[in-house]
Image: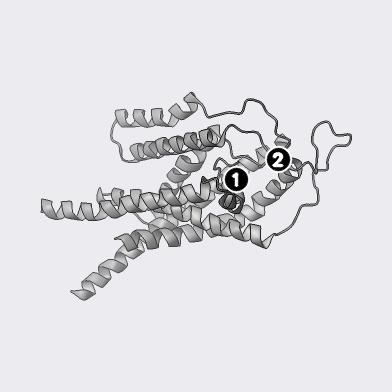
Amino acid sequence: MTTTTQTRSALRFVPALFAAALGIAVISLTGHVQAAALHDAAHDVRHATGFPCH
Amino acid sequence: MYARFLISALFAGAAAGLIAALLQLWFLQPIMLHAELYEGGDLVHFGADKAATVTPELPGFNPVRDGLSLVFSMLTYSGYALIMLAAMGIAEDRGAQINGRTGILWGIAGFVSFHLAPGFSLAPELPGVSAADITARQIWWFATAAAAAAAMWLIAFGKGWSMWGLAAILLLAPHVIGAPEPDIFTGPVPTELAALFAARALGLGLVAWTLVGAFAGYFWQREGAHAEATARAGN
């Protein structure tokens, strides 16, 4: 029983970690990277969502 | 399991991001375009011979610029949905119920973590306002959002005053320490525009986050039910 629960938790935990890491990567890309092309494209959304811009 | 995270996050983020972008174009874009006239010097607020009109001619809809806003809004909220679903998945393992209704609470907690808490000391900026070094503000932003997100988790799932006390400290600390501020104020934009922008940005943030939370909870539950039905049919 314990083994099953642990396996199930592990099955959930690793994908969750993966989702969180991917999410943080996406947020960094759309909200924080200062490369000129990205900054210009995301400019208005960055201001609207309260990311530090410029 | 990977698919369940990805599908729920993409659907929730795309739907909420699309609505958020349309609201942004309607309520925030005119204020930004107006502020840019001051930023670029087309309008002058202080020291001009004649006061500038409060209803200047603004550039209208710009397909490229506004289209990119749609895309990046959907991407941003998909990223937020991924982070929120990661926490939702772990919470469900520990006995929490995740669905569209409880998702609303998750969305509000996400808004507090990623928009309200950083915005409390680094108010949503209009183009043209003066601000401190961007790197310092980004570090402060990430630290504040992480601390607030941890605090939200402790308030929701912590038991006892020690947990809640720790949550209060996590919420307060970044603001007691203080956000990076500019040395001097040189922004050419009228305070009336900046105040309206900050209020509306936070208001729309709450709407967008509530939607992300509700959609993420809904799709998470739906994808789970679908997977279970498929597994049962397979047996």
Residue corresponding to mark 2: B193
* Front residue of B186 and B158: B186
Image quadrant in which the C terminus of chain B is located: bottom left
Chain containing mark 1: A
Q: In 3D space, how far apart are the residues under numbered discs 2 and 1 (Cα atoms)?
A: 14 Å
Residue occupying image coordinates x 69% and y 59% = B62
Image quadrant in which the N terminus of chain B is located: bottom left
- Secondary structure beneath label 1: helix
Is residue A47 visible in the rendered image? The answer is yes
Q: In the rendered structure, are the residues bearing label 2 and label 1 in contact, judged by CB atoms less than 8 Å apart? A: no
Residue B51, image quadrant: top right
The label nearer to you, 2 versus 1, is 1
- In screen coordinates, is B3 left or right of B19? left
Q: Picture coordinates of residue B173 (x, y %)?
A: 44, 27
Residue occupying image coordinates x 75% and y 43% = B40
Q: Picture coordinates of residue A14 (x, y %)?
A: 27, 52
Q: Which mark is residue A47?
A: 1
Residue occupying image coordinates x 40% and y 35% = B147
